[in-house]
Amino acid sequence: MIVIRNETAPDIPAREILLDRALPGRHLKTCEKLRRGRSPADGLAFSAWQGARLAGTVRLWHVEAGSAGDALLLGPIGVLPECQGLGIGTLLMDHALAQASAMGHRAVILVGDAPYYERFGFSPAPTASLTLPGPFERDRFLGLELVAGTLAGAIGMVKAGKRLDAGDDRRRAALIEFRQAA
Ligand SMILES: CC(C)(COP(=O)(O)OP(=O)(O)OC[C@H]1O[C@@H](n2cnc3c(N)ncnc32)[C@H](O)[C@@H]1OP(=O)(O)O)[C@@H](O)C(=O)NCCC(=O)NCCS
């Protein structure tokens, strides 16, 4: 059975290992510039547990989506390679989007494979006149309006949002592992 919970600090070492396996090269992505040194939006980081094993992770982040203003950036989402195709990604996406909507957020953007994300309502149309602070493939830059019309006519650069933090997950993971071993 899979259980989705809010991410907590002790999840971070396992999350780092999971993402290194599911998404090698993730630190080089343009979206990482919008996340680096920041914390996810409050209440919008989730872990999927299969018993005692962390099987999946997803986070959402505050961004400014050009002229549309406040929005969320989704990512990374990752599922352990041996657990992929079991519906865990779908559980994480459905839960994350439902929570974001319940919390009053109005739009979500991401960069990813359209054939996967379109089943959750994402498409390239809402982000067509937005740009990111680095290289990206236009057909993988997708948006979803949680409130209809939020991204209508949105134009300009996506910038990191207001939530600041000194977070570096690789350092935090090493610290948590050190404390657990002590
Ligand atoms: C993408 C990912 C999060 C999906 O999670 P998951 O638990 O494997 O997905 P689910 O079991 O919920 O859904 C499986 C369905 O998604 C499809 N799917 C999975 N990855 C896909 C992709 N990259 N593109 C298109 N479809 C994809 C499967 O073919 C399957 O389709 P079906 O329902 O028609 O059979 C996970 O596979 C993962 O971490 N992959 C490695 C990273 C990656 O490839 N990211 C690319 C997306 S940006």
Image: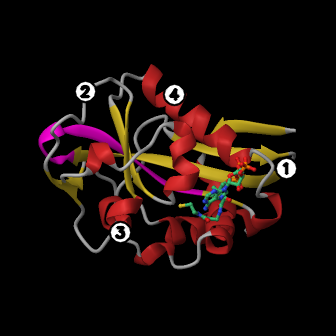
Comes first in the chain, label 4 or label 1: 1
Comes first in the chain, label 2 or label 3: 3
Residue under label 4: 99
Residue under label 1: 52
Disc 4 to disc 1, C-alpha distance: 24 Å
Q: Which residue is painted at 60% across and 72% down in the image?
A: 174
Disc 2 to disc 1, C-alpha distance: 41 Å
* Disc 2 packing (10 Å; few <14; some 14–19; many ≥20): few
User: Which portion, as a residue range, is magenta?
Assistant: 65-77
Nearer to us of marks 4 and 2 is 2
Quarter of the image with the C terminus in it = bottom right
Q: Quadrant of residue 135?
A: bottom left
Comes first in the chain, label 2 or label 1: 1
* Disc 3 packing (10 Å; few <14; some 14–19; many ≥20): few
Residue toward you, 79 or 130: 130
Residue under label 3: 137
Could you tell me if the residues under marks 3 and 1 are in contact, i.e. CB atoms within 8 Å?
Answer: no
Disc 4 to disc 2, C-alpha distance: 19 Å
Nearer to us of marks 3 and 4 is 3
- Whether the residue under disc 2 has CB within 8 Å of ligand 1: no
Kind of element beneath mark 1? loop
| Residue type at the position of mark 4 | Gln
Q: In this view, does 174 lie to the left or right of 75?
A: right
Residue under label 2: 149
* Disc 4 packing (10 Å; few <14; some 14–19; many ≥20): some
| Residue type at the position of mark 3 | Glu
In the image, residue 35 lies at what x, y percent? 36, 59
Q: Quadrant of residue 107?
A: top left
Q: In this view, does 164 lie to the left or right of 54?
A: left
Disc 3 to disc 4, C-alpha distance: 28 Å
Q: Which residue is painted at 48% across and 54% down in the image?
A: 75
Q: In this view, does 122 lie to the left or right of 92?
A: left
